[in-house]
Amino acid sequence: MDKVLFLCIHNSARSQMAEAFLNKYGNGKFIAESAGLEAGKLNPLVVTAMKEEGIDISGNATKSVFDFFKEGRIYQYVVTVCDQANAERCPIFPGVYEKINWSFPDPSALAGTDEHKLVQTRLIRDTIKNAVLEFIADRK
């Protein structure tokens, strides 16, 4: 079973969605975790968008990648889901088979009404879901 770590800036949106999708669709072949460069606050629009997919992340804690690093956790894959500049701030985990960068827009940076932001969050969610499904298919 491969361990996968999804990383973003605050562990409040993108990495949480990727973790949830891999744990749901990975058919027990993967153990997914997520963390951020600094722990933030779970994005309520992301919680809503994930509930629409039948996944409840409302009780998830946000976590710091540096805590995982200090604990000596080992991952086969580290997937950054933020922009390249922030991805380069992540620590290097020993034993990583592959480091992957998926750059997705940050739902917390969206502007407009809550309804507009929810529509955009759904698009980001769907893009992340497709990337996770492709990740799984490529490793069969």
Image (cartoon, grey):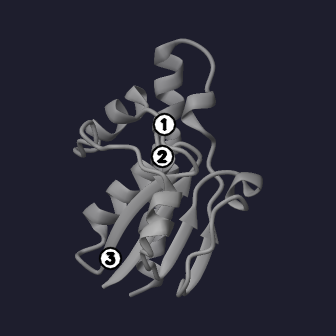
In the image, taking residue 96 as reference, residue 31 lies left or right, namely left
State which tag comes first along the sequence, 2 or 3.
Answer: 2
Q: Nearer the viewer, residue 35 or 140?
A: 35
Q: Residue at x 49, y 34 (%)?
A: 121
Circle 1 residue? 40
Circle 3 residue? 30
Q: Amino acid at mark 3?
A: Phe
Helix, strand or loop at mark 2: loop
Q: Is residue 5 above or below residue 110?
A: below
Q: Residue at x 24, y 46 (%)?
A: 55
Residue 17 place in picture, x, y as percent: 41, 49
Callouts 2 and 1 close, C-beta under 8 Å? yes
Quarter of the figure that contains the C terminus: bottom left
Quarter of the figure that contains the N terminus: bottom left
Q: Residue at x 24, y 39 (%)?
A: 59
Q: Residue at x 64, y 62 (%)?
A: 90
CA separation in Å, label 2 and label 1: 6 Å
